[in-house]
Image: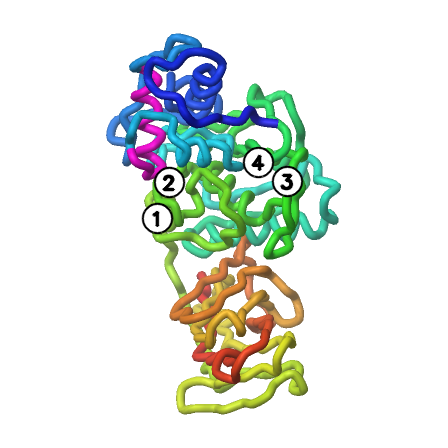
């Protein structure tokens, strides 16, 4: 269990509380930052984007001195708290939240650190007993799908013996990488940065470790004392791809865990495309909202097809699946195309109508699943990546799992406008 950081300290304070504060600031890169960064393979580069002013020397142990105050102000600045330099209650509360174990040494990316290939392989060294192996595999695929939706990156599951770039482990305590976990509800996970091209990777780079002292779940909302594996995995894979922590609190790459966050913020997208760029779309095919197929007619109160969308009102407290068959150009200019991502445009009447899951198919084969996304309100252009970007064979389909709660018909409605797929050459 991580030591609790207690409020009430300021410059001049001495004792165990000051030592605990210094240990925290040292661990997360605010005191002797390069030492903390070196542990995860993070390098400083001239011109790196968004680097914070951090202390280059250590503080006097157990004394809240000038160095400690400056480091604390930098922590407050990074996390957009009032820069008092005092260990006030708001700062202590944030420090005691579950978080990623990678230090906060930059605000955007560690410039120059990226994989030299866009075809990345990953493997499991072991699993957690908290979930079935198939459920863990699906959660990891969904996490990779967030990054695949915005970049040319492909993520393929392989055997451990194949020498993958990213090795996934569930471990506890001291697990041999020099960065031991601290038990329940402290550091949730950590990952190691990629190499700096043209340097070849060393074995630890890209590897991603989850603290098996935590209780992992894929249920949204998670139960008390459990953590969403999709969210934490997607965050850690951001590090494994070269992203550092973000100062934007709504970003997936913010350092603290705040519950399920199964989407990329604009800051995350800016960071990952800065490193890897976007991709060239060979074909983008859409189908109209009036072409939707309803799986369970008995769970629908009304269907109205307007000129440019279909309005569906679900019966109270029901679930349903709505399906789109997307026109599919399988072969173009003698080249077989590949899936990149699915896209949806829809509006719901509010939280009484929620798009819970989105599944992407090639014929009868489900090639990607974004479960527990729980989207409602206005969704003008929502993207769902296909992590391994497979070739197209049989025809694209998008299935939408919708949960309808209580409330008026207006609150239980979903307006399906269109669904599409981006295809790569």
**Cα separation between marks 3 and 1:** 28 Å
Quadrant for the C terminus in the image: bottom left
The image shows residue 407 at horizontal and vertical percentages of 54, 78
- The tag on residue 246 is 2
- The tag on residue 188 is 4
Residue 301 relative to residue 62: left or right: right
**Residue nearer the viewer, 304 or 83:** 83
**Residue nearer the viewer, 254 or 417:** 254
The image shows residue 138 at horizontal and vertical percentages of 64, 53
Looking at the picture, does residue 134 appear above or below residue 33? below
- The tag on residue 54 is none
Q: Are marks 2 and 1 in contact (CB under 8 Å)?
A: yes
**Residue nearer the viewer, 418 or 78:** 78
**Cα separation between marks 4 and 1:** 22 Å
The question of residue 72 being in magenta is answered with yes
Looking at the picture, does residue 310 appear above or below residue 330? below
Magenta range: 67-82
Tell me which numbered mark, 4 or 1, is placed earlier along the sequence: 4
Query: Residue pushed farthest front?
Result: 8
Location of mark 3 (residue): 123
**Cα separation between marks 4 and 2:** 17 Å
* Res 385 seen here: yes
**Cα separation between marks 2 and 1:** 8 Å
**Cα separation between marks 3 and 2:** 27 Å
Q: Residue at x 40, y 86 (%)?
A: 308
User: Quadrant location of residue 29?
Assistant: top left
Circle 2: element type: loop
- The tag on residue 267 is 1
């Amino acid at each position: 269990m991580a030591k609790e950081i207690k409020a009430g300290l300021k410059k001049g304070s001495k004792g165990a509380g000051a030592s605990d504060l210094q240990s925290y600031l040292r661990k997360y890169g605010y005191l002797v930052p390069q030492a903390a960064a070196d542990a995860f393979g993070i390098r400083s580069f001239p011109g790196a984007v968004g680097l914070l002013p951090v202390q280059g020397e250590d503080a006097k142990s157990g004394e809240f001195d000038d160095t400690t105050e400056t480091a604390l102000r930098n922590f407050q600045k990074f996390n957009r708290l009032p820069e008092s330099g005092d260990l006030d209650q708001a700062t202590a509360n944030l420090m005691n939240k579950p978080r990623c174990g990678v230090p906060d040494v930059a605000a955007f990316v560690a410039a120059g650190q990226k994989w030299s290939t866009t075809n990345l392989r990953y493997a499991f060294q072991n699993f957690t007993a908290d979930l079935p192996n198939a459920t863990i595999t699906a959660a990891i695929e969904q996490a990779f799908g967030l990054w695949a939706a915005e970049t040319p990156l492909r993520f393929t599951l392989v055997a451990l013996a194949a020498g993958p770039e990213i090795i996934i482990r569930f471990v506890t305590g001291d697990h041999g990488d020099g960065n031991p976990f601290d038990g329940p509800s402290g550091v949730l996970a950590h990952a190691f940065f990629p190499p700096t091209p043209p340097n070849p990777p060393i074995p630890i780079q890209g590897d991603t470790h989850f603290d098996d002292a935590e209780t992992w779940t894929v249920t949204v909302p998670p139960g008390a004392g459990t953590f969403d594996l999709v969210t934490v995995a997607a965050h850690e894979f951001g590090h494994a791809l070269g992203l550092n922590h973000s100062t934007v609190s709504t970003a997936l790459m913010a350092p603290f865990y705040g519950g399920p966050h199964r989407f990329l913020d604009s800051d995350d997208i800016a960071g990952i495309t800065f490193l890897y760029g976007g991709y060239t779309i060979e074909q983008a095919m859409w189908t109209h909202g009036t072409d939707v197929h309803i799986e369970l007619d008995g769970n629908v109160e009304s269907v109205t097809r307007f000129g440019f969308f279909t309005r569906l009102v679900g019966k109270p407290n029901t679930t349903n699946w709505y399906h789109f068959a997307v026109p599919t150009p399988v072969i173009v200019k003698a080249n077989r195309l590949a899936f990149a991502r699915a896209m949806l445009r829809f509006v719901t009447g509010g939280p009484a109508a929620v798009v819970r899951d989105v599944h992407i198919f090639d014929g009868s084969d489900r090639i990607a699943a974004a479960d527990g996304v729980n989207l409602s309100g206005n969704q003008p252009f929502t993207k769902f990546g296909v992590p391994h970007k497979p070739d197209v064979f049989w025809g694209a389909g998008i299935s939408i799992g919708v949960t309808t709660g209580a409330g008026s018909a207006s609150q239980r409605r979903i307006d399906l406008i269109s669904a599409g797929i981006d295809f790569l050459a």
